[in-house]
Image (tube, helix red, strand yellow):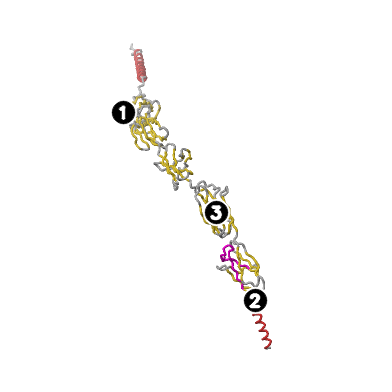
Amino acid sequence: MIKHRLIIGLLIACVLICGTVQAVTLRISVTDEKNGDSLADASIYVDGEYVGTTASDGTYSYDHSGKRDLRLKVARRGYQDWTDWVDADRTRILVEMTRNDETLTVEVYDATTLQPVTGALVRVEGDGLSRSETTRSDGSAIFSVRSATLYDVDIRASDYYDVSKTVQMENTERIVQYWLFRKDLLGVQVRDAETSEPVEGAEVFIDGARAGATDSNGNLPLHLRREKRYSLKVTAPDYQPYQEDRYLEEDNVLFLVHLSKSAYPISITAFNELIKPIAGAEVYLNGTLQGKTNQYGRIMLSDVHAGTYEITVKAPGYEEWSKVCQVSGNGEDIVAELDYDRASVTIRAEDPDQKPVADAAILVDGKVVGVTDGLGCIQTALTTNKVYVIAAAREGYENVSVDVEIPLGTTEFTIPLVMERTFNVWMPIGIGVLAAVLLGVVLVVRRRRMGAGRGRPRGRRRL
């Protein structure tokens, strides 16, 4: 029995010893195929099963029985997958991974016109790659590069500043876009000398040739070579021409031009309603007094800058005249026709005893303006410095009419109208006829009475 147990123990020990001897540790080292750099975080698969990732030094140790060959797979982002068979007794293996190829597209545009730049030379360098391409009609150049790699991009084009950039490729294709600024770009900026506002539509001439007109912001981009002298001329409607010679330095990028408004003569003549000149009328431009008209109703202003002005003319006894005028070209001849002031006129109708006559119809120059109130009055507004025919009419009263002049400069005026009561010529005649008829009736009655008295017997005589 004891021998039996001893034999079994020896067998088990042999099995254990044999198993221990046959166990194998496979050390896997993962590196970049090009530069030999260790690749951390590479995923390790054995016989299709994920077993772990490489450490920071790019290594991974895998223990197995050593009885059979292994199907090893290594995968990492940005690299092509690596797969191969490993002998069962192998203890070390070096896996060199190849980076994936990706597409890098470089697009180049003009910074001023926003149009593609054709024919620009684009150079890409990095990871042992050095290639140059010329941009096509759409401004693009295409390169095949490695993923997860840093590249230097240099761009050159005639009359443009060079551009140098750095591009980090990931695991997908990438499109990068760059502006190119012209070396010969010069901006001309035109402003109003007084207000500093932009002048739109200003014509710019370089060496006598028209180069273009400024936009709504007063700007015009030009392409001029540096280190050269140019004749610059700028013109605009209602502005004085600007001209000078300038030497364009290498670092000059902007010409600032201030234009001064042109000055024009204007005349202002003031007339009244009768087309007679008004002397001494005050003339204002945008609220500022410029002077007074002469005996002919005229004033001359010799240097009025082009622009829009509110012109106002004032004179005693006249309503204010105002008009907005555009001063440009050869100046302006402005005629101001001033209306007379209007006065508040009270028309009062009364009888000879100065008692008010109400409900009397009032006419001014033959037109009815209303009827008098209980106080015999009516008010109306009439132009001064004019003669009016004022009339009144009412039943029972004689019509009355007077010519009245409203003095110039008058603000209030009263016109009294005395109305006589109407005298009826038939009334005395009627009264006389009635009295005569009555007198005739009385005489007839009396005569009849007297006749009756004489014909009656006085009494009988006695026998």
Q: Which of the 4 image quarters holds residue 234?
A: top left
Residue occupying the far left of the picture: 353
Looking at the rendered structure, the secondary structure element under dot 1 is loop
- Between the C-alphas of marks 1 and 3, the distance is 114 Å
Residue 307 can be seen in this image: no
Looking at the rendered structure, the secondary structure element under dot 3 is strand
Place of residue 114 in the rendered image (x, y in percent of width and height, measured from the top left): 52, 47
Q: Is residue 199 above or below residue 279?
A: below
- Name the kind of residue labelled 1 in the image: Gln
Disc 1 to disc 3: CB gap under 8 Å: no
Place of residue 201 in the rendered image (x, y in percent of width and height, measured from the top left): 46, 39
Q: Earlier in the sequence, mark 2 or mark 1?
A: 2
- Name the kind of residue labelled 2 in the image: Gln
Q: Which residue is mark 1?
A: 354
Q: Quadrant of the N terminus?
A: bottom right
Q: Please name whichever residue, 265 or 47, is drawn nearer the observer in this view of the structure.
A: 47
165 horizontally vs 398: left or right: right
Highlighted magenta segment, given as a residue range:
25-45
Q: Earlier in the sequence, mark 1 or mark 3?
A: 3
At label 2, counting other C-alpha atoms closer than 10 Å, the crowd grade (few under 14, some 14-19, many 20 or more) is few
Q: Is residue 276 above or below residue 188?
A: above
Q: Which residue is mark 2?
A: 22
Q: Which residue is mark 3?
A: 123
Q: In the rendering, which numbered label is found on residue 384?
A: none
